Structure formats: C-alpha cells, structure tokens
Image: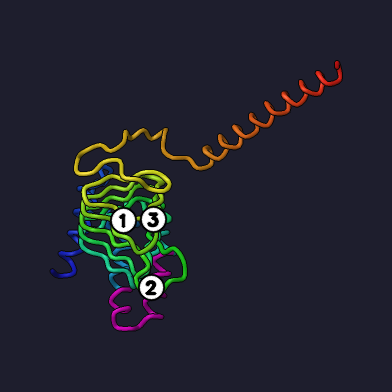
C-alpha cells in the first residue's frame, strides 16, 4: 500500500471511531494520535536500519508535539486509533496488531529491568481504555477490552473484558463472569482502610473489657 493510501486509511479510522471528526482537513491538522502514528512509522524505519539515535530523536520530537511516547522499536499494525492520546506510553518491545484502539493515559510498559521481550503484545481489535496500565511481557487477546484505570499483569484471553486492580476477567466469550459495576471496582486503599478500622474496633472492644475487669477487681 502506498504512503498516501496508508495515510488516508489512518484518517478513515478516525471518522469510524470519533463522531467529533468533521473533515479530512481538520483530522489531518489537529489529531495528535494520528500524528504520533505517522511520526512512529518514520522513527521505526530508521530503527530497523539500526540508526537508533536518529530514531530516538524523531520519537522525542513526536512526544514533544503530541504528548504521546512511542518507542521507535515498537511494532504497530494497521489502523491503530489513539483517541486524544495525552500521556500514552508504548514501550520498545510492544507488538500491536490491527484495528486496535487506545485511549489517553494508557501505558504499555515493562515491570523492571529485564531484557528481551518485556512489553505487552496487543492482538487485533483489542481496546484499552483510559488510564489502563498493561505491564510486562503479556498478551492482550483478540477482541479483548481493558477497562479504564485497570492494572493488567497477566494475559487477557481473547473475547474478554478485564477491569480492576489487579485486572480480572469479568466477561469472556459473551458470558458475564462478574457484574460490572464501575463504582464497585477493586479499591486496595479502601480495603486496607476497612481492615485497619476492623482492627481498631477490636482493640477498643478489648480495652472496654479490660476496664470492666479492672473496675470489678477494685470493687472486690
């Protein structure tokens, strides 16, 4: 596919995914997610020629103008749609398939200083919602959805929906595993506070018992 046809295909995806898009001229000039993808193609070409420094410079220029950081080593398929995009980070060994949608604040990152494949693989037609963190050499299966704010540390099966911290499968192959109530997503801070409150209540109850025993002993 020629470069101009590929660019038009990228813009067509915007019209399919974003009802706010009005004209090709507007999309061409103002959609930072689109610009980031185009910058990445240039940077990735230099990366493949082992011109690593030049590739990194291009990726950093892209980051400056778009707010989206894509390492030039990442492998990205066709029709990637990055909506808004501010704060998106895509690591060096990421592999992204076709027709993937990524929203703002998403991180496709590593978990430490390990070598080799250390970033996620995202299969075709996957969707990763706002603020989700997908970490490590894991796989997000085809047609999978990652809920907003989730932290995913394990493989996500195809045709499934994952939410929470850590991410848990709630729908798989159209079957609901657990009711999706956004106001009831796992909250480790709230859980810890509840546990501490239970311990405080238990200590207070023990103190009351000790005071009662002390008073009885004083009466005797």
Q: Which of marks 2 and 3 is nearer the N terminus?
A: 2
Range of the magenta residues? Answer: 43-63
Q: Quickly name the residue at label 2.
A: 58
Q: How far apart are marks 2 and 3 (CA)?
A: 30 Å
Q: Residue visible at 23% across and 58% down?
A: 123
Q: Quickly name the residue at label 1.
A: 155
Q: Are marks 1 and 2 in contact (CB under 8 Å)?
A: no
Q: Distance between the residues labelled 3 and 1?
A: 7 Å
In the picture, measured across the screen, residue 34 lies left or right of residue 2, that is: right
167 in relation to 65, above or below:
above
Residue 217 shows in the view: yes
Q: Is mark 1 on a helix, strand or loop?
A: loop
Numbered-mark total? 3
Which callout, 1 or 2, points to the residue nearer the camera? Answer: 1
Q: Distance between the residues labelled 1 and 2?
A: 32 Å
The quadrant of the picture occupied by the C terminus is top right
Residue 26 shows in the view: no
Q: Which mark is residue 153?
A: 3
56 magenta-colored: yes
78 in relation to 209, above or below:
below
The quadrant of the picture occupied by the N terminus is bottom left
């Amino acid at each position: 596919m020629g470069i101009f046809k590929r660019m038009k295909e990228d813009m067509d995806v915007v019209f399919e995914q974003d009802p706010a898009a009005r004209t090709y001229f507007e999309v061409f000039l103002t959609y930072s997610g689109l610009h980031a993808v185009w910058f990445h193609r240039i940077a990735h070409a230099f990366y493949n020629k082992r011109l690593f420094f030049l590739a990194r410079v291009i990726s950093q220029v892209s980051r400056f103008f778009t707010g989206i950081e894509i390492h030039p080593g990442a492998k990205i398929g066709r029709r990637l749609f990055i909506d808004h995009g501010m704060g998106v980070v895509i690591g060096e060994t990421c592999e992204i398939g076709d027709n993937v949608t990524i929203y703002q604040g998403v991180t496709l990152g590593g978990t430490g200083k390990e070598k080799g494949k250390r970033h996620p693989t995202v299969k075709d037609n996957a969707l990763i919602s706002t603020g989700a963190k997908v970490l490590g050499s894991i796989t997000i299966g085809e047609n999978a959805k990652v809920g907003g704010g989730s932290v995913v540390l394990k493989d996500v099966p195809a045709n499934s929906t994952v939410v929470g911290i850590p991410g848990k499968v709630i729908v798989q192959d159209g079957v609901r595993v657990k009711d999706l109530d956004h106001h009831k997503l796992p909250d480790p801070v709230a859980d810890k506070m509840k546990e501490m409150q239970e311990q405080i209540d238990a200590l207070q109850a023990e103190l009351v018992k000790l005071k009662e025993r002390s008073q009885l002993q004083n009466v005797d």
